[in-house]
């Protein structure tokens, strides 16, 4: 399986993602944002970081990068595109997934482990994951998911919510919501579910020497689903 | 020609920065403030000399980059 990780000026989780993808069997290529063409890929990842210094709105500049037109075409033709953290912010700015990510409700940069409940498994990202709840890491200042009422209805009607913030038992309540996201949303799909945007970083949970291995479950499963 | 743009958050969108500014003003003794909403202001100096054409271009910039229409409104202010 071939993957591509896009590096934007200010990306800082691109190499972590490269390590994670390779660890679980992807042949990964790093792609520079100013390139026009994507290499042949089964998965394209927009990594976390602070692309363009978060100027204007997080992800807004990166969403207009040269490579993004190829990424958008790839996604629109059914290709798997995953945006993590800043990558999620870039995805919402392209319009590939609905909504926006606002400043965290309590104006704090949040860096901690959280639990997320997998809301939908009828997709290539979470199909066959045994767990209902994953422990993943978040680190963001703008992760407060927001969308209009009409968008929310559409998202819910199409089962586009991928994961919700919850407690270790999968209970989804306001007190387990770290950043004020609508409905505790931590990640969403596009309508066709080939595009996933999420705030948590699975690439930070792939080794016991890090703070956990639930990211390993995610990647092992992902590559199997793509084969 | 210079064109100015003001971007504001839509009414229903939470503005935590505006809230904190409000609280701080309150603490400083400005206790008659009802609400504070924070926005953005841009000055765009364009080569275009026709006022209508320049405004149309800036409107396109607002829609494509300067504003995110899910949460923000834009207002183009006449050039001087």
Image (spheres, coloured by chain):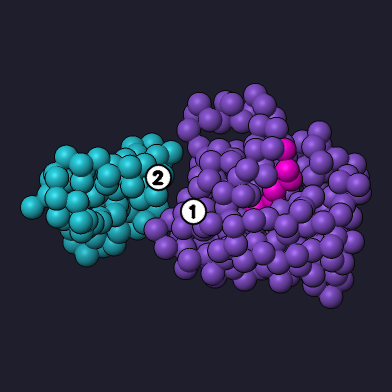
**Quadrant (top left/top right/bottom left/bottom right) for the N terminus of chain A:** bottom right
Residue A110 visible in the current orientation: no
Q: Is A82 one of the magenta-colored residues?
A: yes
Q: Nearer the viewer, residue B31 or A40?
A: A40
Q: Which mark is residue B71?
A: none
Tag of residue B64: 2
Please indicate, yes or no, whether residue B17 appears anywhere in the rendered image.
yes
Which SS class for mark 2?
helix
Helix, strand or loop for disc 1 = helix
Quarter holding residue A129? top right
Per the image, the residue denoted by label 1 is A64
Residue A220 spot, x, y in % from top left: 89, 55
Taking the spot 20% from the left edge, 56% from the top edge, the residue there is B47
Residue shown at the point (77%, 36%) measured from the top left: A120
Q: Chain of mark 1?
A: A
Residue B26 is situated, as x and y percent measured from the top left of the image, at: 24, 58
Is A35 above or below relative to A102? Answer: below
Chain displayed in cyan: B
**A49 relative to B60 in the view: left or right:** right
- Span shown in magenta: A78-84
Q: Which chain is depicted purple? A: A
């Amino acid at each position: 399986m071939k993957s591509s990780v896009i590096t934007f000026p200010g990306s800082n989780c691109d190499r972590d993602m490269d390590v994670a993808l390779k660890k679980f069997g992807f042949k990964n290529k790093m792609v520079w944002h100013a390139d026009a063409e994507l290499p042949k890929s089964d998965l394209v990842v927009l990594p976390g970081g602070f692309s363009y210094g978060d100027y204007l709105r997080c992800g807004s500049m990166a969403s207009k990068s040269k490579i993004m037109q190829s990424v958008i075409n790839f996604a629109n033709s059914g290709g798997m595109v995953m945006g993590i953290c800043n990558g999620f912010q870039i995805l919402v700015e392209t319009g590939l997934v609905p909504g926006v990510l606002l400043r965290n409700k309590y104006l704090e940069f949040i860096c901690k482990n959280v639990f997320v409940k997998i809301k939908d498994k009828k997709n290539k990202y979470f199909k066959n994951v045994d767990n209902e709840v994953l422990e993943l890491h978040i680190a963001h200042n703008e992760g407060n998911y927001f969308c209009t009422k009409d968008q929310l209805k559409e998202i819910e009607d199409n089962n586009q919510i991928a994961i919700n913030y919850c407690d270790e038992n999968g209970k989804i309540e306001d007190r387990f919501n770290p950043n004020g996201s609508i409905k505790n949303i931590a990640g969403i799909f596009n309508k066709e579910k080939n595009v996933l945007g999420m705030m948590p970083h699975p690439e930070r949970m792939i080794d016991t020497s890090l703070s956990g291995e639930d990211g390993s479950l995610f990647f092992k499963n992902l590559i199997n689903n793509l084969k | 020609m210079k064109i100015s743009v003001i971007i504001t958050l839509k009414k229903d969108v939470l503005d935590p920065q505006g809230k904190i500014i409000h609280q701080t003003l309150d603490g400083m003794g400005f206790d008659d403030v009802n609400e504070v909403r924070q926005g953005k202001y841009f000055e765009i100096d364009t080569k275009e000399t026709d006022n209508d054409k320049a405004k149309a271009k800036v409107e396109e910039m607002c829609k494509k980059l300067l504003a995110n229409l899910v949460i923000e409104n834009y207002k183009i202010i006449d050039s001087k």
